[in-house]
Amino acid sequence: MVGQRFLEALHERTGTAGRITVTVLAAEPRPAYDRVHLTSALSGTTADELSLCPPDFLTAHGIDLRLGEAAVAVDRPARTVTTASGARVPYDTLVLATGSYPFVPPVPGHDADGCHVYRTLEDVAAIRADAADARTGAVIGGGLLGLEAAGALRALGLDTHVVEFAPRLMALQIDDAGGALLRSKIENLGVTVHTSAGAQAVETGPDGRVSALTLSDGTGFPTDLVVFSAGVRPQDRLARDCGLPVGERGGIVVDARCRTADPHVFAIGECALAVDGRVYGLVAPGYAMAETAARAITGDTTGEFTGADTSTQLKLLGVGVASFGDAHGTTEGALDITYANSRAGVYKKLVLGPDGSLLGGILVGDTDAYATLRPLAGNGAPLPVPAEQLLLPQPAGSTGGGVGAAALPDEAVVCSCHNVTKGTIRAAVAERRRASVPAVKKCTKAGTGCGSCEKLLTSIIADELAAAGTPVSRGLCEHFTHTRAELYEIIRVKGITTFARLLAEHGTGRGCAVCKPAIASILAGLGDTSYILDGEQAALQDTNDHFLANLQRNGSYSVVPRVPGGEITPDGLITIGAIARDFGLYTKITGGQRIDMFGATVDQLPAIWRRLVDAGFESGHAYGKSLRTVKSCVGQTWCRYGVQDSVALAIELELRYRGLRSPHKIKAAVSGCARECAEAQSKDFGVIATAQGWNLYVGGNGGATPRHADLLLKDTDRDTLLRTIDRFLMFYIRTADRLERTAPWIERLEGGLDHLRAVVVDDVLGIAGELDELMARHIEGYEDEWAATLADPDRLRRFVSFVNAPGTPDPSVSFVPEREQIRPALPEEVGTR
């Protein structure tokens, strides 16, 4: 990554194009790629998607990239580099960007079959291959990379253990209290954590493969796979062998211009020991070193690298963690303020200097404030609000208490990956006339690294445009100046039934991938039928709706029949099993209590759905922005703790709201008692039974930004419950923004939950009747999309892989066997089946 950034920085310097000839020697078999998001390769991200090297970049700049050609020796007097193939490459200037290598503790058995490191795409492929036959995995190391590796093993379906020698996880970044909370949240996900213990021995079976791990505290456990992630070491062998000075603990010694003791040799990134005596293992410092070296090589005497910000923000097994500045309070006279809420799974600490300025902090469980707090740390300026207000949670819908973009000084670094300040961003808007987030990103590179600063970047741009009197577009996209909510009202009031008419009367151009599906959803919701593939509507849908199925990573589709409330008969189970067997599909129980069948091709979809519809199943709308599932426990019918019939209510709700098109997907649940087995408080709407009736919760959210739902009604009867949910959903559909879930919608509402209650319960706006009518219209007009499709030969014509060769399967869809089923083939595996 650092080497690629150096190439970009070199060719951004004025006059370098065509004047400097660059040869890149790469030990790996592929161009530079994003190691920060390496784990995503396990969930379908391809090597091409992770690539950091644009297809035409090398050719445009005349760069000679030699893949799989590792450098093995440097002859400094002759100024040549010898490669593994024996080639000798001359140089005028040599840049060492060799990075680091994983440290593997020399414990007995560390080189057994089943032991891995976690560093490259090839490592990921090897781990995936071994995991196919494994049940348990262990990760040695509980730091950043170790927890990333643990997440990878867990994603592969393994029972996962993490072994950390320190007394807490992420010991370098967070303190004891933060580490305790992080451990608790990770253990709640099913990962076993061992701290204050190291690996003593890797045990093997008769076949020479890993069978167990023995720890230094005398305990141990069986395991089929071990990943060593116990830190990295600078890859400095080339420098050592050619006589360049290296640090006592490794790292090529460089000066503030990233130059080694040899003026013709530079070192950047994880292989370099900076002038402050540190080896930096993060991307942002590496990028800063790359830019420093590029300036020096092209004769620019400005800019030095004397140290860097080591702040980090990331999600580890779904848990947000951030650390910035002097997080451990090592500055003399430092004071700290903490906020902890174990019920909500949140820990926050701010470290203040004796003068009250912010020195650093730690955030676990809720890292939303990181982008704003990090630039304030270490600048010596007093905080714009009392520090306590930066920690305490704010009421839903409130904008007070926190610190926004306006409070940051111009010298504050907004994008640490590319060292872009707020002043640079403001100048891009005011002086260089960049009036959108994409334009500013292209101009400054802000927001193009890890992406954690994007929300703050957007706020700064909006503030600058507003200050200049430039209208900030609130429109749905470039083709409509109205918001989604405004367009909903226009369509409803004027009775518009086509996208073409709406575009002609209220938009410009031809529309795009943003506005077309958004408008299609509104039209479907307000139309006489919810079917979405007739006439003009068909051309407006996105990929999934286009074929009424979910597109998967290899071009195949998944099929998800509706299973209301999770209740299914034995005959229904047999039908699904027989279909999956006959079509060779991969089957999985979903989190919403239904069965997903993966691996169908477009031309197979009608045949699969014919059998499902004949057996009484209907579309589960897993492909649409609509109601997905209403999850339930077994309730009082079977459970000795249940106080109401949760299954019956869940089925009623799912059938009532099936096919309801909305700004985003909707998930729901019904629990039969306060033990909450259906997890109703993490859903867009959730119902929990009480001895007196039902409690209604709204605005919950799992996923990347978990949020507990808010209590809207207490101990209510069934009719009031249904009427309130009807109005809640229709008010959300009517006023939410495009792709906005209910959780951020409620937080954005002026007045928050109180305003929502006033609208849907007390009818303060006088629109309750309209909301009731809209829901009644939906319920009356619902038809199953797949049943309607199968009944119409014209509709069925779209389900072919090739329009000029109906019945011909798509040869690019390929699978390989795994755990007695199939999975999509990786690029390197294509052709194995």
Image: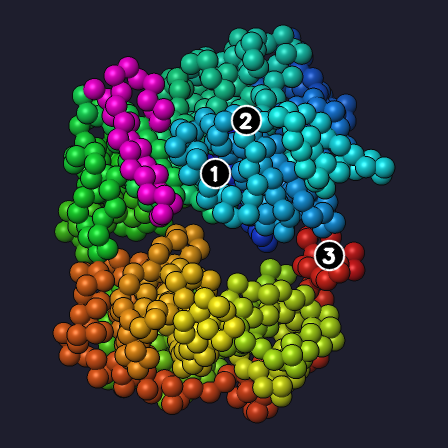
Which color scheme is applied? rainbow
Q: Which residue does the image show at 68% across and 59% down from the upper left?
A: 823
The residues colored magenta run 326-354
Find out whether residue 338 is within the magenta segment: yes
Disc 2 and disc 3: Cα gap in Å? Answer: 36 Å
Q: Mark 1 or 3, which is nearer the eye? A: 1
Q: Mark 1 is on which residue type?
A: Arg
Nearest the eye: 580 or 273 = 580
User: According to the image, label 3 marks what residue?
Assistant: 818
Q: Which label sits on residue 196?
A: 2
Query: SS at mark 3?
Result: strand
- The residue carrying pointer 3 sits among few (fewer than 14), some (14 to 19) or many (20 or more) residues within 10 Å by Cα, namely some
Q: Quadrant of the C terminus?
A: bottom right
Nearest the eye: 30 or 646 = 646
User: Measured from the top left, where is residue 831 in percent x and y?
Assistant: 77, 57
- The residue carrying pointer 2 sits among few (fewer than 14), some (14 to 19) or many (20 or more) residues within 10 Å by Cα, namely some
Find out whether residue 216 is within the magenta segment: no
Is 823 drawn above or below residue 433 in the view shown? below
User: Measured from the top left, where is residue 355 in percent x and y?
Assistant: 18, 21
Q: Which label sits on residue 183?
A: 1
Q: Which residue does the image show at 29% across and 61% down from the upper left?
A: 710
User: In this rendering, would 516 be left or right of 578?
Assistant: left
Q: Which residue does the image show at 58% across and 36% down from the upper left?
A: 162
Q: Which residue does the image show at 38% across and 86% down from the upper left?
A: 779
Q: Mark 3 is on which residue type?
A: Glu
Nearest the eye: 406 or 611 = 611
* Res 546 visible: no
Q: Mark 2 is on which residue type?
A: Ser
- The residue carrying pointer 1 sits among few (fewer than 14), some (14 to 19) or many (20 or more) residues within 10 Å by Cα, namely many
